[in-house]
Image (spheres, rainbow, N blue to C red):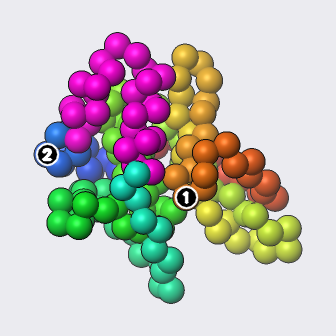
Amino acid sequence: MRQLVRESQKSQRLANLATTLYMKSPTNRKRLLENVDRFIRDKFTYSDEKIETLQHPDYMLKGLEVYNRLIGDCDDITMLHAALLIALGFQVHFVAIRDKHEDPNFNHVYLETENNGDWIMYDITLPLGTQVEYFGRIAVMV
C-alpha cells in the first residue's frame, strides 16, 4: 500500500485535485483537512470485494472523471486519501485493526494524519464521529 501511495505522487490527476482543494483554504490546515474529508466522503461509494485487490489512487481518480464517484473498499479509499494528504504536505499513518476478538486477522484499514501535533483518525467508510472498537492495531507511517 505504501508503495502505491508513493508512486501516486507522480500523478497529474492527484496534483490537480490537491491544488483545487488547497486553493479553498490555503492558510488553514484544519479547514483543509475538513475540505478533503468532505470531498472524499461526498464522492465515495463503498464496494465490497470478494477477492482482495488494491486500486492505485490514480485509477480511482480516473473513475472519478468517468463516473463522478470514487468506488472501492477501505484500503482503496485509504490509499487515495493518504496520497492526497501527502500531496498537501501532511504526515500520514496507515492503521490496520482487528475488530473481532476471536479473529487473528486484521480486517480493516483507515488512516491517521498529523495536524499541530495531534494525530487525527479518518475512516471514510464510517460516519463522522463513529467510535471504533478493536482488539488489535498496527500503525505504519506512509
Q: Relative to 67, is 3 above or below?
A: above
Q: Does the magenta stretch include residue 11?
A: no
Disc 2 element: helix
- Say few, some or many: other residues with alpha carbon within 10 Å of mark 1 (under 14 / 14 to 19 / 20 or more): some
The residue that label 1 is drawn on is 125
- Residue 31 in the figure: left or right of residue 107: left
Q: Residue at x 44, y 24 (%)?
A: 31
As shown in the figure, which amino acid type bears the numbered disc 1? Thr
Q: How crowded is mark 2: few (under 14 residues within 10 Å), some or many (20 or more)?
A: few
Position in image of residue 105 (x %, y %): 70, 71
**What residue sits 48% from the left and 84% below the top?**
51
In the image, residue 102 above or below residue 78: below
Tell me which label, 1 or 2, sits earlier in the chain. 2
Residue under the point 59% across and 19% down:
117
Q: Which of marks 1 and 2 is in front?
A: 1
| Distance CA(mark 1)–CA(mark 2) | 26 Å
What kind of secondary structure does the magenta stretch mostly adopt? helix
Is residue 86 something that shows in the picture?
yes
Q: Looking at numbered disc 2 in the image, what kind of residue is underneath it?
A: Gln
| Quadrant in which the N terminus is drawn | bottom left
Q: Mark 2 points at which residue?
A: 12
Task: Evaluate if marks 1 and 2 touch, with contact meaning CB atoms under 8 Å apart.
Answer: no
Q: In which quarter of the image is residue 32?
A: top left
Question: Height in image: 3 above or below 75?
Answer: above
Q: Which residue is drawn at 43% across and 42% down?
A: 38
Residue 121 rendering spot, x and y as whole percentages: 61, 40
> Does 24 appear in magenta?
yes
Nearest to the observer: residue 113 or residue 67: 67
Is residue 1 visible in the rendered image? The answer is no
Which residue lies most toward the right here?
102
The magenta region covers 17-41
Extreme-bottom residue of the structure: 50
